[in-house]
Amino acid sequence: MRRSFAFKFTLLILLWVLAAIACVQIPAHTFWPAAFGALTLPIALAVNVLLVVYWLLRDWRVAALPIVVAVLTWPHFQRGLALHPLHTSSPTGTPGQRIRMLSSNVRIFNVYPQLRDKNLHSSKAMIAWLADNQADILCLQEFYNEPIRTQDGSVFNAVRQIGADKDRHVFLSKTLTNSVGAEFGMAIFTRFPILQRGTINFGRLTQNHAMFVDLLLPSRDTIRVYNVHLQSMSMDERDIVDSYSSKDGFKRKARGLLARYKRGLVARSTQVDTLVQRFERCRYPMLLCADLNDVPYSYAYDQLADHFQNAWATVGNGIGSTYNGALPFVRIDNQFASSQWAVDDFEIHREIPFSDHFPTTGVYQLNKTQSETSK
């Protein structure tokens, strides 16, 4: 009797895993409730691993079922919990083909009054850290720059400090210029010549967008780098914490949070579909930095994972959370690389606490043979 119940329970878990994977692949603009099924996938995968252990102790023949599922779904498992304990970074690479890329949501360098600290310490420290960073390419989201000298212009003239002062080329994609000439948007800084640049707009109702540059490496290879910022859920961290901390908080906050979560899901699903169409037409080796505003078990992440290697899932260890706030275990900042690249290393800079996102650095080695075939 016990064995019969355990076997039926195992079949239910396997069906749960398959259903959750199917939910991950459903775009929210088609059926948004599927996103909640997708969020259960890490739990289903974890239970399946426990079933492997259970049946190996009880009956190895039945254990074959969860083992097969675990093997087939291992890439999905790695999305949420990367395991590469034996991976070591190679300090060398082919000259001109080894790239170090940094990505960071800089939260407009804390320029707003509610974000500022004494003597603008975090703003100055963040810009100085980026300016002195040894990365070959810097992709920055929620960028802010004051090209016209204002009271704090010497602090917030980020294009000059990170770009011209450090002999970097820059592409600033502006979504807004305010009354004093301050610029908001995203930016790419690089030591490599920029051959071509462009933006990908997601519509008139959002400032979120993507940008790209084609770069000429010292090896004479041309690569394309995308910098992406998908739609925010516009959900205040305090509201989320309040919604699950008490019954009263849930009643007051849940409906509004759900509505905002739905709007974000739908927007991101259409935005990532727009991007994928562009990726499929690109003939160069690609690197991508993205603030997805979504977790690894989402449609947006899944679409990118179908076309790219995720750097953390390829070489990282652990959950790889990048959100610097009260919500634990949240990885919404990612770097991706097309198949022409080998991912050598990936680091999350938790020692840099100046924004609500931790910066990330990836190291990539271009496969010469594959890069030649893409030309």
Image (cartoon, helix red, strand yellow):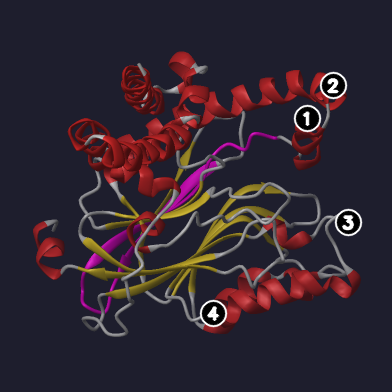
Q: CA distance from mark 3 to mark 1?
A: 27 Å
Q: Amino acid at mark 3?
A: Pro
Tell us which disc is closer to us: 2 or 3.
Answer: 2
* Image coords of residue 126 (percent x, y): 69, 72
Q: CA distance from mark 2 to mark 3?
A: 28 Å
Which residue is at a point 59% across and 50% down the rendered structure image?
Answer: 329
Q: CA distance from mark 2 to mark 1?
A: 7 Å
Question: Which residue is tagged 2?
Answer: 252
Question: Which residue is tagged 1?
Answer: 243
Earlier residue among tags 2 and 3: 3
Q: CA distance from mark 4 to mark 1?
A: 39 Å
Earlier residue among tags 2 and 1: 1
Question: Which residue is tagged 3?
Answer: 113
Instruction: Characterize the magenta stretch by its predominant secondary structure.
Output: strand
Label 2 close to label 1 by CB (< 8 Å) = yes
User: 225 or 61: which is nearer to us?
Assistant: 61
Q: Amino acid at mark 2?
A: Arg
Question: Which residue is tagged 4?
Answer: 133
Which residue is at a point 65% across and 49% down the rendered structure image?
Answer: 328
